[in-house]
Amino acid sequence: MTNCPLERAPTLQSASTTAFYVWSLFAAVDLSLFRFITTELTRGYFLEHNEAKYTERRERVYTCLRIPKELEKLMTFGFFLCLDAFLYVFTLLPLRVILALLRLLTLPCCGFSGSRLLQPAQVCDVLKGFIMVLCYSMMSYVDYSMMYHLIRGQSVIKLYIIYNMLEVADRLFSSFGQDILDALYWTATEPKEKKRAHIGVIPHFFMAVLYVFLHAILIMVQATTLNVAFNSHNKSLLTIMMSNNFVEIKGSVFKKFEKNNLFQMSNSDIKERFTNCILLLIVCLRNMEQFSWNADHLWVLFPDVVMVLASEVTVDVVKHAFITKFNDISADVYGEYKASLAFDLVSSRQKNAYTDYSDSVSRRMGFIPLPLALLLIRVVSSSVKIQGSLSFMCVLLFYLGMITLKVLNSIVLLGTSCIFVKEANMEEKLFDPPPSAVSSQATSEEEGLPDNVEAANLVQSSASALPKIDSDTFLTTPDEDEEKIIIINTGQDGDGLEPRRPKKDLLEIDRFTICGNRID
């Protein structure tokens, strides 16, 4: 016991000596680490030294916050434009067809004066009326209930694939359908003195009837698939269909977009939202018929309807917000889009208008109201039974109500469109001649110049105005004020110069014009 303190003394002395040497080594070698940590805790930086960069980042945040408001303004305006063209089929088109037929019947009594039996607009109205009547008679042989049970018996994955295929087919039908209708209208109304180098009015008419009928069947299958998704017990199909909307973000956000491409995609989104509303209306009508028009069942469908519309709005907002962010597009561009759509409405009300407004909406947005209106008439006529004088009175009152809604909607849209056109300083363009007159005048002026003089002037003026750039500078049309012709150098000194067409104005852009980028 007396030896224990003597034995611990060397150990404590050696430990203290070791600690002293370790501390000295740390102080001598790792002094830079202590200084680094101290500097990291106390260092400062000044954001104002890069003011432009951070101001730009803040403006991007403000732009993203403005996108939902500006986008919904455009969507609301475009939605009511589609509604106006859609109500036109039910309200004013039948009256215009009746007036045109009365003119044909009263011509022998009043005497014939003039070169036309009917005006071009009346001919187009009569053709539209005949197309609707023939297609409705053909649609009456289509059994909606059998189609519903046939689709209901398919698996969820198969229905999901079918629905995606139907969406693609609907866009293809819309792109080609308006061309078929325009070809019919022009073939039936072109001046008689022109040489007819086409197949005639009757083949064009049957092509238009076949198109409207097939497109209506396509939309019916879409509505039936959506109805099956609503009535499924686990809602798995509806969930998968809604998740398909978010896949659209991946396919659009990470692509290069110019202002014209974004305008096309905005028009497509407007058309898609309006079409989905009509499809949901058809689904609600069919379900209410199956439950004997019990109002309680409507509240069962209400959450699913809200989910479909909410997902559509969310996807549109996120998609447009990030597209404008990645492509450095201002939120003010949606005001230009509204002005372009408003210009179509205002110009269609002029005396020298060369197209009907509903056809202009069809070309601009890819929305063709005839097949959708035909399907809605078919569903309503099969869902609602009209019996007795009271039912006919209700139908008459409903028709008068639709006319009232159409007139009020047209008045409000026309007043709003005049404001948009005035704010965009586009009033002068309302008095410009039609494109055909401008192109014919330009052609006649160009024919008066020799080819070599014209080409030399073109190359000289363009080369002096703009520098030579690479061919991949613009993937689509230019975005700013490059109104001049771009000259592209093919690699040789002065040889192989080709003029590139100038930027298209927004008024010249329809739904299916630009194919440089994948639109939506």
Image (tube, rainbow, N blue to C red):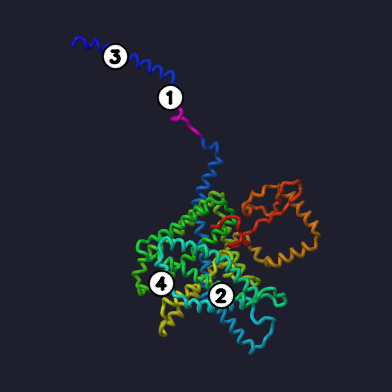
Q: Could you tell me the amino acid type at mark 3?
A: Leu
Q: On screen, 313 above or below 382?
A: above
Of the image marks 1 and 3, the number of the one nearer the N terminus: 3
Give yes or no for contact between labels 2 and 4 (Cβ–Cβ under 8 Å). Answer: no
Using a 10 Å C-alpha cutoff, classify the residue at mark 4 as few (fewer than 14 neighbours), some (14 to 19) or many (20 or more): many
Q: Which residues are magenta?
A: 35-45
Amino acid of disc 1: Phe
- Residue 501, how many percent across, how many down? 68, 56
Between residue 361 and residue 500, name the one nearer to us: 500
Q: Along the horizontal axis of the image, is 296 left or right of 517?
A: left
Identify the mark at residue 12; answer none if there is no mark: 3
Residue 68 visible in the snapshot: no
Q: What whole-number distance in Å separates the C-alpha atoms at marks 4 and 3?
A: 94 Å
Q: Inspect the magenta stretch and tell me whether residue 42 lies in it.
A: yes
Query: How far is mark 2 from mark 4, CA to CA?
Result: 26 Å
Q: Which residue is mark 4?
A: 286
Rendering quarter of residue 418: bottom right
Where disc 4 sits, the SS reads helix
Residue 226: percent from left, percent from top: 43, 65
Q: Which element is circle 1 on? A: helix
